[in-house]
Image (spheres, helix red, strand yellow):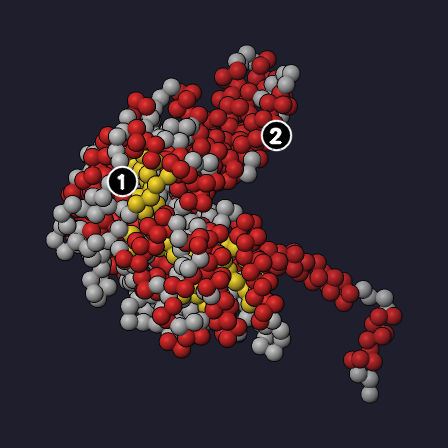
Amino acid sequence: MPTALDDAPAVKTAGAPRPRGVRRDRRRAALPYLLLLPAILLELLVHLIPMIAGLVMSFFKLTQFYIRDFSSAPAAGLDNYKFVLDFDAAAGKSLLGSFWITVLYTVLSVGFCWLFGTSAAVLMQKNFRGRGLLRTLFLVPYALPMYAAVITWSFMFQKDTGLVNDLLGTDSFWLIGDNSFWSLVVVSVWRNWPFAFLIVMAGLQNIPGELYEAAAIDGAGWWRQFRAITQPMLRPVNQVLLLVLFLWTFNDFNTPYVLFGASAPKEASLISIHIYQSSFVTWNFGLGSAMSVLLLLFLLIVSTVYLGLSARRRNAVV
Amino acid sequence: MRIGKIAPALVLALAAAATTACGGGTSSSAPKELVYWASNQGTSLDNDKAVLQPELDKFEKASGIKVKLEVVPWTDLLNRILAATTSGKGPDVLNIGNTWSASLQATGAFLPFDDAALEKVGGKSRFLGPSLAATGASGQPPVGVPLYGQAYGLYYNKKLFSEAGITKPPATWEELVEDGKKLTKPDKGQWGLSLQAGQITENSHHAAILGAQHGAQFFTPEGKPQLASDPSVAAVQQFVDLMQKDKIVNPANAEYADTAKSLKDLSDGKAAMFMNQASAGSFKNIGMDMANLGVAPIPLPATAPPNGRKVTSFVAGINMAVFKNTKNPDAALDFVKFMVSAPEQALLNKTYGSLPTVQDAYSDTAFQTEDVRVFQNVLANSAEPMPQVPQESQFETLIGTAMKAMFADVAAGEPVDGAKIRDQLNQADQQIAAGS
């Protein structure tokens, strides 16, 4: 009695390529997932698992007493959240203060970075002698090691021995008091505007030259060309640039930490420093986690709204 | 530290530590090997290696136990210890700042030095009482043994004193302020006293010393924080007033976040006095004319406030602890015993300019100098440990940070009065209570 197996060679000899083709199709369909697998695994390991762990930690009273054995930490329920969101009490008040300082810092820093980056990129569009050198020089702050650059700024901001007071002919404090906030903004803008410059410059490369030529023939001046061609064509680039700068700046830890040390002056106490102090200086990891979760939620909401609005605007334009 | 994932980053850090910090604990059947995390005591990490390695070789030759050394900078040490505590994969033996003792004791990650363990390292009676008292909460077995002793003293520039016609260092706070005023000449860039007013830890140390003089107890016997008490407020006010009211401190000191600047001020004649731990070696390194350098105990008030204690320093120093997870507890204790032996204590403390923590090392002539005698006397007679409570690290951070902000306000011309100080200390109380 013939079996299916007996039939198989006959099928093959008939020359029908289907099974091999199906296998190949399946393999081809699986390939993208296989290629994604390492990224997914890394994303899980590096971001998602720690985030989930952080979320779990925020519901526990995890202090140095339990750090050796996480599982023995008593449950806190929503206590950590209630504590940091009680704006009448000290912890809530100072968190809220840090939040508003961070908002102002982000608005100013991102705004100036975008303004300087865009201005420089537009100016660098025209070909002139020394353009290459100038472009390279603009990128120096971005290429320098962050720590070395910011610590140098901290030396320059010293009251008695710093270069800033020397140059300005002043006798002010820059690393403590009200001025510390402005020092932070200056260093952040100095450090990040080359990124904006780089991205906008890349965006400008994609605008066809013919558009400008046609506009020029129609009599459009430089400003009109900028408003009618450059700005709209740069919109997708700007949308991504502003979002990335916003996220980086709102979470900026390195600049204040290197500039002021572990305890920034209250006028420049960004939310990231606040969370660091709760988690790693006063050893209250549960509280620090709760603050991190709240920050993450805030950033998620802002990013989602921003992306939603951007998409709606893009669709409306289309 | 980006994208607001600082708390999850802890997990990452801990995971990383689990893979990198697992040098400790080798099999007991193999030739014994220990991992030792030494704190940075010398002028650099390399300097520490140069000082310690010959001693570790000496120990290996005598005992057959190899010690792998890693010198950890102070800025990293506490977080490294915490990571090791969490992962359970730490060194066998390590140095801890003695003010962290009670906080680290609370983690339960360290070998308790009960009477039997103390006996193995030479016996309880060998150690200086105050140094041993700063090794953990009272009533519990210590979390380590003292290795390097330190105490605060008042350094002064003899040349500036003599130019101002002052013949001896101040014995009371009132004299310190009076002398400070005579020595303050802002037009010449000279000030009576230099303070590391932007340094959290230093501020907290001075709050503790002055607090004790005012009779403050920062924690109740049950361990509840009470930083905002009247004596604490008075102590902080007195300290801040050195810049605010007495004006003997350069307002620029509000930015001073490290010792180097104050040492240099004293050496350059820009400041006449500076309260610090024993630092003759550092003064020598920056080229101070040592003939001009004098040291005396930090003054006491002329009239002691009610319940005030005669305290001129807290018991400073470094302890040596053994990680509970070590697979070689006996070898670890042998190594501790070696490090606190009289010859090693004399040699290491001489090199680092610190004080031996065992009585029998003081016979060495290096510790017979006038300066060392001052510090030794302070450590033995007028020093008390920082509050030995699990929340000690929070106490230091919060009170030190609050004082740093107060000095910044004073420097900017904003008044810091008792109400403001009490408010700040109240906030610190709340924050400590939240983490208890």
Tell me the subunit letter for badge 2.
A
Which residue is at the far left?
A: B306
Q: Position of residue B4 (x, y in %)?
A: 42, 49
Q: Amino acid at mark 2?
A: Asn
Residue A247 visible in the picture: no
Residue A258's mark?
Answer: none
Q: Residue at x 26, y 51 (%)?
A: B312
Q: Residue at x 48, y 26 (%)?
A: A116
Name the residue carrying label 2. A206
Which residue is at the far bottom?
A: A1
Looking at the image, residue A307 sits to the left or right of residue B207; the answer is: right
Q: Residue at x 50, y 17 (%)?
A: A224
Which residue is at the far right?
A: A13
Q: Position of residue A185 (x, y in %)?
A: 40, 32
Q: Amino acid at mark 1?
A: Pro
Residue B165 vertical position relative to residue B434 in the rendered view, above or below: above
Find residue A164 and report its image quarter: top left
Q: Secondary structure at mark 1?
A: loop
Residue B76 vertical position relative to residue A250 in the rendered view, above or below: below
Label 1, residues with CA under 10 Å away: few <14, some 14-19, many ≥20: many
Residue A218 vertical position relative to residue B402 in the rendered view, above or below: above
Q: Residue at x 57, y 58 (%)?
A: B53
Name the residue carrying label 1. B169
Residues tagged by mark 2 and mark 1 found on one chain of the structure: no
Find residue A144 and report its image quarter: top right
Q: Position of residue B416 (x, y in %)?
A: 20, 38
Residue A12 vertical position relative to residue B182 in the rendered view, above or below: below
Find residue A263 and report its image quarter: top left
